[in-house]
Image (tube, helix red, strand yellow):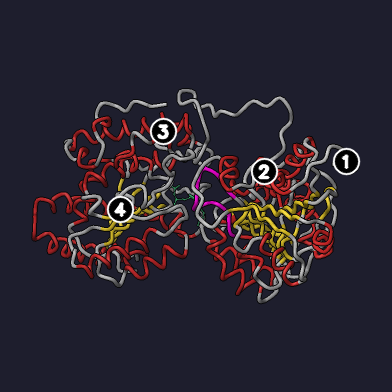
Amino acid sequence: MQIKAGPLLSKINYPADLKQYSEADLEQISQELRQYIIDVVSVNGGHFGASLGVVELTVALHYALNTPYDKLVWDVGHQAYGHKILTGRREQFHTNRIYGGISGFPKISESEYDTFGVGHSSTSISAALGMAVASQIKGETDRQHVAVIGDGAMTAGLAFEGLNHAGIENSNVLVILNDNCMSIDPNVGALKEYLTNITTSKSYNRFRDDISQVLTSLSKLGPNAHKYVKKIEKSIKGTLLKQSNLFESLNFRYFGPVDGHDVKRLAAVIKDLSAIPGPKLLHCVTVKGKGFALAEKDQTKWHAPGLFDKITGEIKKSAQDKPQPPKYQDVFGHTLVELAEANSKIVGITPAMPSGSSLNIMMKAMPTRAFDVGIAEQHAVTFSAGLATQGLIPFCNIYSSFMQRAYDQVIHDVAIQKLNVVFCLDRAGLAGADGATHHGAYDIAYMRCIPGVTVSSPMNEEELRNLMYTAQQDQAGPFVIRYPRGNGVMPDWKRPFKTLEIGKGRKICDGEEVALLTIGHVGNFAVEARAELNGEGIYPAHYDMRFVKPLDETILHEVFSKYKHIITVEDGCLQGGIGSAILEFMADHHYHSNVIRLGIPDHFIEHGEQPELWAECGYDKASIVDAVRKVAVKRSTSNIAG
Ligand SMILES: Cc1ncc(C[n+]2csc(CCOP(=O)(O)OP(=O)(O)O)c2C)c(N)n1
């Protein structure tokens, strides 16, 4: 459905069109841009509050800078909808995050205005610095390089690595700190408190007013501008900045805090800052969800609310006539509290995803035993390792794709020391509309090669509970439990705990000729496929492997002895996945069966609904049916229970 833009916005296809308008029009343009985002996201879904919060900043940046010559890097990129709309993609914006449509994040291959592909946080300063140093080397010293980073993203170590380096390179980097006090959930940590202090401090506010006056007059001063800035800076440093400023101490010139919703002033400040060489930081205060009252009020809920009625604000839920199975994340959240009530050693850790992982359930029930550590996956893992050295049992919950950040910590800090950390990897497998940056495609491969790590995946809610129960009893080193985004299959999921034998899978049914070996939730696709195949007189066996490592060798010996064709199914990359592990087993034990592997192929999978992506990759129910049909011999009756 095509949505109509307002009268000014509809004439803006590129930043050059925006620049035709006078400063006096910028407020109306911002308003129209905000409305357009509301109109489209309400019927299409996607991230919401973050883009609303930077509408004015987006307009000001494209008005003041010379994009795409000047390089603009958005951190995370979930706030870049306004940027997309102003840079040639207004007409396609209704396809945002839809299969085959534009990406929900900036992407180099999509537009020359997208200078850097993002999705994972806190990369913008390093990337912008790389671009700035490249410009310097190429002699393009008039080019600006701007990183827009949120206060949440600023909590990551990577952001500080970028600041630390930028502070000694004399290149043109402007960091715009978009401070809205929010991550997805309320932002956490000492840095947040520091930023709040600056924002509310009287002396800094006076400083802000002084600097604003200087900057306003600067544009009229032309080439002598630097001299004046230096002079003013010196006097300010001598007085106001006596209370030391974190960014100043890293050699950045700090400006702000400024009102991030005053578009005219922002445009003027950004223009003026462009005239100052070297590393600079503009502290910009915004409200997440600005302009949509409900989103301003409940910022976590409106981070990515799904479809909603833009007039009433009612979030649309599909009506279901019977009880639905819960989300895996909620089974994790409730089960962890249940386990922690019985075992005082259990603690919970999340790097900035309390709502997304449902660790917020434990944070509420047991605030002293559950920790949101900020967007800091590496720290989350090593912090968990430290807790484990003291005999606690950390359940460290990290989205599979974000865990990629903390790989060395898993090996170096946890596995080599054989520490008992339980890693719960949420969003394992194809994650859906967030696309390639967010799919949890690699964890089976990257975890199973580490010595001493148990790697498991539940086929349903009960198995998830039992794996968590087993993991806290197991004292044999790191224990990984991977599970997907979305719902399980058991409305009646709260069953009594059972200890599972490590490295033991289960036979779901015997069969003829063909055996399906599945890991995790995709086992349910195989159950559905079998039902269809049975109707055609085809009877594959089915085993839920449950553990990738250690592999159930008893099952594998049985399968390789009994079946001609073995089809492995996994919601993970084929290279190095469980199918690969089974091929290794086959070679090591000199079996010669026909092994067919279904899983994620060796290229990056874009965005779309999960079922669309499962089908594309060839491991949804229909693909399993096809794979079995190709090798199986039909018969009309069977004495084998399906
Ligand atoms: C490495 C990594 N961890 C976690 C996330 C999930 N995530 C997406 S947006 C976000 C919050 C970012 O907060 P902030 O930078 O302040 O931006 P805001 O949404 O407030 O505008 C988080 C935690 C991510 N994208 N990347």
Amino acid carrying mark 3 in the image: His
Residue drawn where x is 69% and y is 46% of the image:
630
Residue drawn where x is 61% and y is 51% of the image:
429
In the figure, is residue 157 to the left or right of 334? Answer: left
Give the magenta-colored segment's residue range: 430-442
In the figure, is residue 61 to the left or right of 427? Answer: left
Q: Earlier in the sequence, mark 4 or mark 3?
A: 4
Amino acid carrying mark 4 in the image: Leu
Q: Which label sits on residue 638?
A: 1
Q: Could you say whether the residue bearing mark 1 is in a helix, strand or loop?
A: loop
Q: Earlier in the sequence, mark 4 or mark 2?
A: 4
Q: Earlier in the sequence, mark 4 or mark 1?
A: 4
In this view of the protein, can residue 8 be seen by the observer? Answer: yes
Q: Is mark 3 within 8 Å of ligand 1?
A: no
Membership of 266 in magenta stretch: no
Frontmost residue, 596 versus 220: 596
Q: Which residue is mark 2?
A: 626
